[in-house]
Image: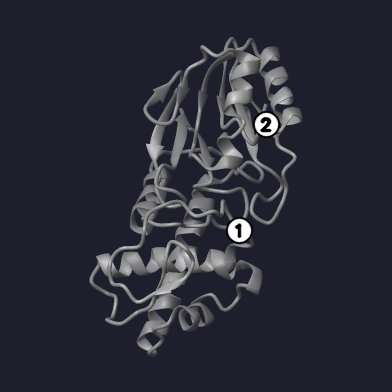
Amino acid sequence: MIAGVDVALVRADNPGPLTLSGTNTWLLGRDPCWVVDPGPALDAHLDAVAHAAALRGGVGGIALTHDHGDHVEGLPGLLVRVGDGVPVARTGRLGPLRALSTPGHSPDSVVWIADDVAFSGDSVLGEGSVFVSGQLGEYLTALANLRTLGLRLLLPGHGDPVVDPQARLAELIAHRLERERRLVAALDGGARTVDALLDEAWSDAPPALRPAAAWSLAAHLDKLDAEGRLPAGVERPSSTGRATWSRSPRCPSCSPYTCCRPAERR
């Protein structure tokens, strides 16, 4: 039980700079329960999820927030443990859950809503900011839409539960807009290369996180371009991480990163 909600957390033992304290698998309700994100393909984790589900009367269905490996690689193994006939959903409705599209971290990202509780995957983390691989405008719109739902609890894919969703969502929107402000200032000052833009707008990112910052930079540049606010001759990060001078849209394929921390570095 978390904040009065009949939900259980099983956290995978895969901590790291990209997964924070590990990937969260959530179980909602009972008789049956509903699983959100099976997590990585770790036997100990999947055994723990199956055991927690059995204590709750079995699994009615499994909802996926997005297709990154640390959230979905355990799906086949979990189905072996709980039954191959259990329905799996990536969008639409599943039992008490309904999906809200939140592209940004990945093109297929969704947040699953159950009444006033949101299972946010990597669209909203328990700490820090989400890594944005594209569709930044749509992502900001999705965050604004979440603020209108009167949510009382956010259950993220990484980190601890968020008991003040309004403040958290406002924080993430403000963070992205501040990144945009710094990027526009850099462009206005004449910066045009990837390195120069990162130096100005992501000056707080350590060398190990510059590749992740470059993906977020690409998403911000795409947004400015779509709005007609991007100057000519701006170098863009490519989908392979190499710089390109092309003005064509960046490849929308998912980044190899799942998230980074802390917030001010993305």
Of 186 and 155, nearer the camera is 186
* Mark positioned earlier in the residue sequence (2 or 1): 2
Residue at far left of view? 228
Image position of 98 (left or right of 171): left
Of 3 and 230, nearer the camera is 230
Quarter of the image where one finds residue 58: top right
Residue at disc 1, secondary structure: loop
Of 167 and 123, nearer the camera is 123
Q: Please identify, in this view, whether the residue under mark 2 or under mark 1 is nearer the observer.
A: 1
Residue type at mark 2 is Leu
Q: Residue 177 location in percent, x, y?
A: 42, 67
Q: Can residue 122 be seen from the camera position used here?
A: yes
Q: Residue 238 location in percent, x, y?
A: 42, 66
Q: Residues within 10 Å of mark 1 (few under 14, many from 20)?
A: many
Q: Quadrant of the N terminus?
A: top right
Gap in angstroms between the C-alphas marked 2 and 1: 22 Å
Q: Which residue is mark 1?
A: 260
**30 in relation to 129, above or below:** above
Q: How many marks?
A: 2
Q: Residues within 10 Å of mark 2 (few under 14, many from 20)?
A: some
Q: Residue 264 location in percent, x, y?
A: 58, 67
Residue type at mark 1 is Cys
- Residue that appears at 59% across and 62% down: 263
- Residue that appears at 44% across and 42% down: 109
Q: Which residue is mark 2?
A: 9
